[in-house]
Each structure stands twice: as structure tokens, then as C-alpha cells.
């Protein structure tokens, strides 16, 4: 989408136009690579899945960069070219689901839908598969760093944030776990297991 076609009451700033142009170039390059990869028909189903996940991740990354630029520039127009993709269906890979909800939250922040943003941030927490990492002696939590400012802005406290952001425990498996027997097992001796066979 050309930057000049974005409706607005004020002209886009130079930074906005530059961000949109960079975004457009990234999307064009990604589309070109995907068309070239589709010419290869010799991939296994697993290789096709890995390729699809890789392109989903690249789209999510491009969208995240656009959303972060929109936040920094305080200009929602920068996010408009990626809006439809951000609000589309979640990716097939579970490892990308949390990043999908993080982008939904960022878009809501850019559009000043703060309650929506908190709901999406919580979904990002609940679907996150990769834990926070230590970086240069500090615990790096991109998700937490993003949402804490909004949480404080809305009057939230630290104890409430810990409750809100807590990942629910995995549900117990319906099969394959130990449980207390409800009936008394019949008595038996080890000898009962050693059945005599002819010729033994």
C-alpha cells in the first residue's frame, strides 16, 4: 500500500514514510522468496511444514517491527499495512502462537485499545512456550517488559500483575496417570504367576 494512500488529516512525517517504505520492501522480498520456494515440488511433508512455519515467523517478525515503529513514532498509520495480517488467524505452529498474540496486543496499544491489549497480552503469556532468558546478568522478558508499563498506566499493582500473568498449570492427562484404586485387588502369590508348562 503506497504511503500517500493512507487517509489522514495530517501529512505523514518523513519517519513514517521511511518506516512504511522499509516495511514494503521487506514484504516484497518475502513474497519473492516464497514464490521461488514454491517451485520446488520435491519436499517431504515435514519439510513443507518447516518452510511454512519459517515464513509465518518472518511475517510475524515484519509485523512486529512495523508495530514497534508505530509505537515509537506514535503514528498508527505505520501499522495499517500489517493490520489485516496481524488480525488474521493464528499460525499453525504452537511455538509461534504467543508471538501472534503479542502482535495483537501491540496493535491494540497502537490503536489505543488498552483493555483489548491486556486481554491479548494475557493470551501471549498463556501460550508462551519459551521461558525468559538471562542476558548480561539481567532476566530478559520481552513480554513482561512490554506489558508492565501498560499495567501500571491502568493502575495495576505488582502483586496483581503476578496473578494476572501467571501461566496456568498444564491440565492433567486423562489417561496414563496414577490414581487411588477404588476396588480391593484380590490377594495373590508370586507363585501364581509362574504357571507350569508341559515339559518344563
Image (spheres, helix red, strand yellow):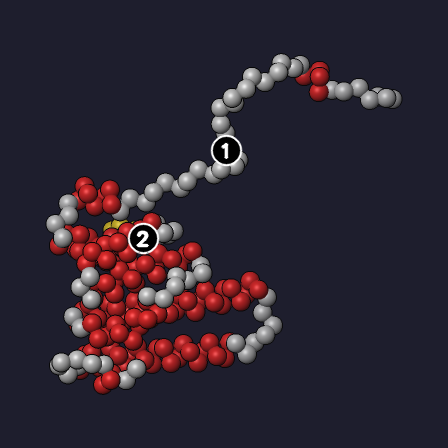
Do tag 2 and tag 1 residues touch (Cβ < 8 Å)? no
Residue 111 in the image: state x and y as whole percent.
20, 66
Specify the quadrant of the image occupied by residue 6: bottom left
Relative depth, front residue between 198 and 90: 90
Mark 1: few/some/many CA within 10 Å (<14, 14-19, 20+): few
- The answer, for residue 133, to whether it is visible in the render is no
Specify the quadrant of the image occupied by residue 29: bottom left
- The answer, for residue 46, to whether it is visible in the render is yes
Residue most toward the right? 199
Q: Residue at label 2? A: 123
Residue 22 in the image: state x and y as whole percent.
29, 79
**Which residue occupies 20% across, 72% down?**
76
CA distance for labels 2 and 1? 28 Å
**Which residue occupies 38% across, 57% down?**
97
Q: Residue at label 1? A: 177
**Which residue occupies 37% across, 70% down?**
59
Query: Callout 2: helix, strand or loop?
Result: helix
N-terminal of the two: label 2 or label 1? 2
Amino acid at each position: 500500500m503506497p504511503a500517500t494512500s493512507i487517509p489522514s488529516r495530517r501529512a505523514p512525517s518523513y519517519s513514517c514514510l521511511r518506516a512504511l517504505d522499509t516495511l514494503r520492501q521487506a514484504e516484497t522480498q518475502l513474497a519473492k522468496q516464497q514464490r521461488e520456494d514454491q517451485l520446488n515440488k520435491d519436499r517431504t511433508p515435514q519439510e513443507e511444514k518447516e518452510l511454512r512455519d519459517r515464513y509465518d515467523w518472518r511475517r510475524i517478525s515484519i509485523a512486529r517491527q512495523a508495530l514497534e515503529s508505530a509505537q515509537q513514532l506514535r503514528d498508527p498509520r505505520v501499522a495499517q499495512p500489517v493490520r489485516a495480517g496481524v488480525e488474521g488467524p493464528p499460525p499453525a505452529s504452537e511455538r509461534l502462537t504467543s508471538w501472534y498474540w503479542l502482535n495483537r496486543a501491540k496493535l491494540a496499544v497502537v490503536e489505543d485499545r488498552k483493555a483489548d491489549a491486556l486481554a491479548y497480552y494475557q493470551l501471549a503469556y498463556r501460550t508462551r512456550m519459551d521461558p525468559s532468558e538471562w542476558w548480561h546478568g539481567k532476566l530478559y522478558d520481552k513480554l513482561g517488559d512490554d506489558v508492565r508499563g501498560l499495567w501500571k498506566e491502568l493502575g495495576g499493582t505488582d502483586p496483581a500483575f503476578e496473578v494476572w500473568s501467571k501461566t496456568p498449570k498444564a491440565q492433567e492427562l486423562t489417561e496414563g496417570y496414577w490414581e487411588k484404586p477404588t476396588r480391593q485387588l484380590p490377594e495373590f502369590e508370586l507363585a501364581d504367576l509362574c504357571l507350569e508348562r508341559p515339559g518344563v
